Image: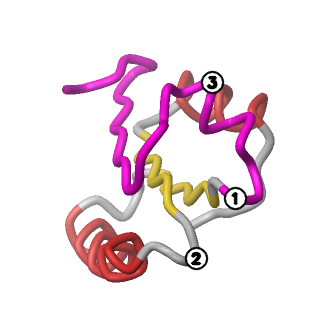
Amino acid sequence: MQTDLTHAQIEHLKSTQALLLLFGGAQCGVCQAIKPKLEFLLAQRYPEMARVYVDCAGSPDICAQHGVFSLPVVQLYIEGRLCL
């Protein structure tokens, strides 16, 4: 998973290809448990999908712009649209 991206870089990825955003933190046990599982599953089934991990302690502005106030949060964007 890519890390340390700016808000503008994330917005560009959202608009150009399928994107999975994982918002987490180093102190979040659930976040650390699901991150390798998501990476493994996506690498096998959807290797072309972009994957980004946002550490909310290091990038609180990005988390706020995406409405993330608790962890973990997984957001999937396809063709620029959030899939619920």
CA separation, marks 1 and 2?
Answer: 8 Å
Crowd around label 1: few <14 · some 14–19 · many ≥20 (10 Å)? few
Near-viewer residue (27 or 16):
27
CA separation, marks 3 and 1?
Answer: 14 Å
Percent x, y for residue 31? 39, 70
Q: Which residue extends farthest top?
A: 81
CA separation, marks 2 and 3?
Answer: 20 Å
Q: Which mark is residue 42?
A: none
Percent x, y for residue 39? 37, 73
Near-viewer residue (3 or 71):
71
Crowd around label 2: few <14 · some 14–19 · many ≥20 (10 Å)? few
Q: Which residue is mark 2?
A: 26
Instruction: Please give the name of the residue rendered at 76% of the width and 58% of the height, measured from the top-left corner.
Output: 58
Q: Which residues are magenta?
A: 57-84
Instruction: Please give the name of the residue rendered at 45% of the width and 73% of the height, measured from the top-left corner.
Output: 28
Q: Does the residue at mark 1 contact the one at mark 2 (Cβ under 8 Å)? A: yes
> On the rendered structure, is 16 left or right of 4?
left
Q: Which residue is mark 3?
A: 65
Give the image quarter of residue 33.
bottom left
Near-viewer residue (55 or 81):
55
Amino acid at circle 2: Ala
Amino acid at circle 3: Gln
Give the image quarter of residue 47.
bottom left
